[in-house]
Amino acid sequence: MSNLSGGSQPSNASWGKKQTTKMSIATQRRTWTRRADTWDRHNDAGMTKVAAQAIEASGVHEGMVCVDLGCGGGRLALELARRGARVIGVDVSAAMVDRMVAQAQSEGLEHVSGIVSPIEHLTIDPTSVDLVISNYALHHLLDADKAKVVNAAFGWLRPGGVLINSDMMLGRGATTEDRQVIASKIKVMAKKGIPGYWRILKNAGRYIFRLRERPITPDAWMQLYRAAGFVEVTSQNVVAEANVVKGVKPETK
Ligand SMILES: C[S@@+](CC[C@H](N)C(=O)[O-])C[C@H]1O[C@@H](n2cnc3c(N)ncnc32)[C@H](O)[C@@H]1O
């Protein structure tokens, strides 16, 4: 069909995609704002191990400029700042960002700032950042948005900069590894009795219909990194469900 207005019209597909992203962002904002007061207490051993591994892999040092995507109450952002980095924490929930900033102030950490924004719409100056990092947040994004964010991060990083995603990484049960991870998660939840069974049911719905939890495999993440131009792409399994995937933006010649 000809375009009578002469301007470029969004296709139905791209309009539909934008609406899906909009709905996903609204759901995440609502969900996480509700959980902001309690999330920091979610310090299970697995999560602590994964976050520690992400920090270790980052090679953080004094003066490094870092962006923490889906920072929540600042689990990674604050730790990076304690080690001398300048950190921008980004989260869709203002309540989460407020908690991070309040904690930074109470610890006297001067170089922590927050941006309330969906990761999907974030803009950062090109080549202005040494490290883009994220813990347990990117699996919430739609798959097409995951690819967009990896590409965007490549642009924000200076040559030699690093992208780290530590997250729940699994497919939808097609492989033995996936099934082992799913079984181990069910086992942990079942030990909690009736509340655990309720969580199993809720999580099953979320995974099957990919409503709020949309994990992909470590291999799929590595492919996104490589497609964006990252090199030295590695994946390290930390606990059954979670890996740390790291890539480096090549130095310019
Ligand atoms: C599981 S929590 C992890 C928080 C923190 N990274 C940590 O390690 O404790 C997920 C976080 O991602 C944020 N989030 C989810 N979807 C988001 C989006 N589209 N844009 C920005 N933040 C998002 C949530 O608000 C929440 O704070």
Image (tube, rainbow, N blue to C red):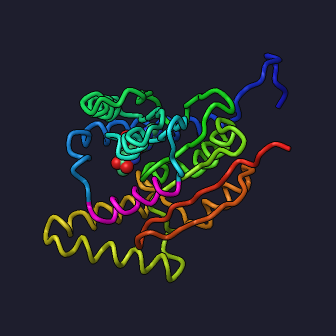
In this rendering, is residue 247 above or below 171?
above
Quarter of the image where one finds residue 206: bottom left
Going 60% across and 29% down the picture, which residue do you hit? 124
Is 209 or 238 nearer to us in this picture? 238
Inspect the magenta stretch and tell me whether residue 126 lies in it. Answer: no
Going 26% across and 47% down the picture, which residue do you hit? 39
Is 113 or 2 nearer to us in this picture? 113
In this rendering, is residue 171 above or below 112?
below
Is 225 or 104 nearer to us in this picture? 104
Q: Is residue 218 left or right of residue 202?
A: right
Residue 90: percent from left, percent from top: 45, 34
Q: Is residue 124 left or right of residue 170?
A: right
Residue 105: percent from left, percent from top: 29, 27
Residue 27: percent from left, percent from top: 38, 40
Q: Is residue 241 left or right of residue 61?
A: left
Q: Let me know if residue 252 appears in the view.
A: yes
Residue range highlighted in magenta = 44-57
Q: Let me know if residue 27 appears in the view.
A: no
Inspect the magenta stretch and tell me whether residue 56 lies in it. Answer: yes
